[in-house]
Amino acid sequence: MVKLVVVLKGQGNMLTGNKAPSAANLEQWLKEHPGYEVVRSGGKVVTAKVSQIVLLVKKYFFYDGA
């Protein structure tokens, strides 16, 4: 089962692993959790792989423009 990475818009709360929705139940999960959206990188949906999550956090939350 592929788990997707989702983030709460405006707050940056990211859900991964067992707390995140699977691709199979994404539509229903998003209806039950308004405000969350699927994290995308380069136009592709991000799955719950630790290396990808670390890169996303650095890119979107700690980027200083340098």
Image (cartoon, rainbow, N blue to C red):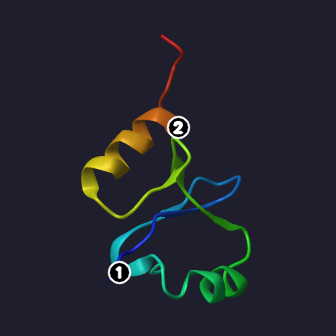
Circle count: 2
Percent x, y of residue 12: 58, 53
Q: Kindly identify the amino acid type of the residue bearing the numbered disc 2.
A: Tyr
Side of 30 relative to 61 (left or right): right
Q: Residues within 10 Å of mark 2 (few under 14, many from 20)?
A: few
Question: As displayed, is residue 28 above or below residue 52?
Answer: below
Percent x, y of residue 63: 49, 26
Residue closest to the eye, 29 or 57: 29
Residue at x 51%, y 41% (from the top left corner): 42
Residue at x 43%, y 43% (from the top left corner): 57
Question: As displayed, is residue 12 above or below residue 20?
Answer: above
Residue at x 47%, y 31% (from the top left corner): 62
Percent x, y of residue 47: 39, 63
Q: Kindly identify the amino acid type of the residue bearing the numbered disc 1.
A: Asn
List the residue tagged with mark 2. 60
Residue closest to the eye, 42 or 62: 42
Marks 1 & 2, CB-CB < 8 Å contact: no
Q: Earlier in the sequence, mark 1 or mark 2?
A: 1
Q: Looking at this view, name the residue that lies furthest to the top.
A: 66
Q: Which mark is residue 18?
A: 1
